[in-house]
Structure formats: C-alpha cells, structure tokens
Image (cartoon, grey):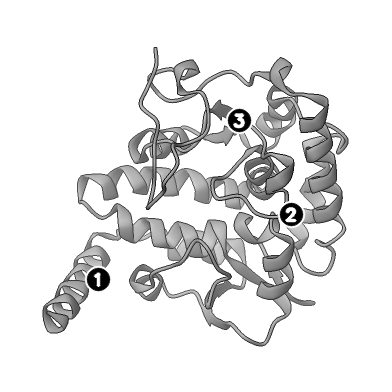
Amino acid sequence: MAVDPVVYGASERPPRGDYSRAQTDYTCPQHYAAYTDADHDTWRRLYERQAALVAGRACDVFIRALPSLGPSHHIPRFEQINERLYKATGWEIVGVPGLIPEVPFFTLLANRKFPVTDWIRKPEEFDYIVEPDVFHDLFGHVPLLFNPVFADHMQEYGKGGLKAHGLGACEFLARLYWYTIEFGLIRQEDGLRAFGAGILSSPGELRYAVESPEPRRLPLDIERVMRTRYKIDTFQQTYFVVDSFQELFEKTAPDFAPTYERVREMEEELAANAA
C-alpha cells in the first residue's frame, strides 16, 4: 500500500525515495538488488573518508561499535546488522523510503526499531545532501544503538514523542533531537567528542564541532535547548554538551509537559512583542 511522501521545511523538489514500496507504518524491505556498483563505491568512499576522521573526534562508544556495521567496501545488509544489534540491545533497523511522519517515526522508536533510509546519495552529492540517506542513517546513528544506555534513551525519546504529539509540542522535542541525537557533544576524560549523527557523518562539521573556537558549547539544559532554533544548511552556532549518556538519559527522563508550556508561553510573548 502506497503512502504519501513527507517533506519537512521548505523544498522546491519532491522527496526522494519510492514511497509506493512502503507499508502503512512507512517501513519497506531494503531493496538490496537495486544498488549499483556505483552505489557501493559511493558507500565505500564515504565510509573510508569518515572513518579516517573519527579518531580523536568521535566518542569512544561510537568508535568501538563502528565495526559492527560490517565490511566497509559495500552497503551493509540490514538483516546482517540486525543479527548483531538485537543481541546487543534488543534493537533492530527497518528500511524506509525516506523521511517519515512524526507518529510513525516515534512509534518505531518506542518499539526499539530505528528507521533507515535505504537509498544512497548520487556521486555529485558526495560532500553534501539535504535529506538523510543510508550512509547518514547507518554510519551516523546505528553504532550508538549498540550501547545499552543510549539505546534505552532512544526508546524513551520515541515514547516521549508520541506524548508530545498529543500535546502539540513536537517542534520543541524536535529541537532536543537536533541538538542531542543529531548534533550532540560529549565530554570524555581525554576531551570533547561528538556523538550526534549529523556531526559524525559530516567531514566538515566533525572537525568544526569538536575543534573550532567559533561555536558556543553549553552544558545540556533541556529548556534552553527547546528554546533554541536550528538551521539545516550551515554548521551550528551552538552545541550542547553532556558528560555521559547516563546524564542524557536522566535529564530527558522527567515529564516535559510543564517545560513545553513554559517554552510555548515564552515564544508567544516574544511573538507578541515583535508584532
């Protein structure tokens, strides 16, 4: 059964991906036979470039888990990763044709299923792609799902997302996702490291986020994160830092409903003052 494509933000082109293959929950089998030799070569070159940059910049948990994706010279098969991932944390990855709506996304996470786009970027998009592809999702996100604490955090985020949807607060929770799961930093004993997938899958931002003196790096404050808007087409001006994944888990455990109300009231007041 076909489902409708999804677009977040402004875009002049239709979403990529064959949504006619998707089931009602937006999942679809990985169409492995559709990958060309050029696709596998793109994966190999992306993997080799990024793997050469993560030492001293990515968190230790990510570096230890990266080999769990399997050989680097071809696009991994989802079912082979799942054999290892389920044994480690009870998670599995599921194929999707591209971006999916909030409720199916949160529902999958709440059931320990991580959606992975199954197509890969074109060679001309090697350095930058607007939508997440299989490289971003697998290389950037999946290794940390082998860590039990982070894996539990992701499930709780999914449960919280379903609640936020009912409260009309998904935008605030999206900012938390952006500044932690996509662009989060963690402080290890040997220095600052990246754990966000948007950083880990980007050669330029990996160096910038960890080493540049330009951006602000602030301790993770949930309410401040939910007040902080983000940009998708430039490096971040602000990053938020945790000292451990346990801290991330604990700071995101409380009921966010009162926080949503405070942030909403502040934004409404700012909008009224600007009018």
Identify the amino acid type marked 3. Answer: Glu
Asked if residue 196 can be seen in this view, the reply is no
How far apart are the alpha carbons under marks 2 and 1? 32 Å
Where does label 3 land, which residue? 92
Viewer-proximal residue, 85 or 22? 22
Q: Position of residue 93 (x, y in %)?
A: 60, 31
Measured along the vertical axis of the image, is residue 73 above or below residue 238? Answer: above
The mark that comes first in sequence, 1 or 3, is 3
Residue 175 shown left or right of residue 144 in the figure: left
Identify the amino acid type marked 2. Answer: Phe
How far apart are the alpha carbons under marks 3 and 2? 17 Å
Identify the amino acid type marked 1. Answer: Val
Q: Residues within 10 Å of mark 1 (few under 14, many from 20)?
A: some
Q: Residues within 10 Å of mark 3 (few under 14, many from 20)?
A: many
Residue 263 is marked as 1
What residue is shown at x 83% (from left), y 26% (from top)?
37
Viewer-proximal residue, 103 or 18? 18
Q: Position of residue 52 (x, y in %)?
A: 87, 58
Q: Secondary structure at mark 3?
A: strand
**Quarter of the figure with residue 63:** bottom right
The mark that comes first in sequence, 3 or 2, is 2
Residue 62 is marked as 2
Callout in the foreground (1, 3): 1
Q: Residues within 10 Å of mark 2 (few under 14, many from 20)?
A: many
How far apart are the alpha carbons under marks 1 and 3? 34 Å
Q: Are marks 1 and 3 in contact (CB under 8 Å)?
A: no
Q: Quadrant of the N terminus?
A: top left
Q: Position of residue 271 (x, y in %)?
A: 17, 76
Asked if residue 93 can be seen in this view, the reply is yes
Count all numbered tags in the image, as a single digit: 3
Measured along the vertical axis of the image, is residue 220 above or below residue 18? Answer: below
Query: Given the current orientation, which residue lies at the most extreme bottom position?
Result: 213
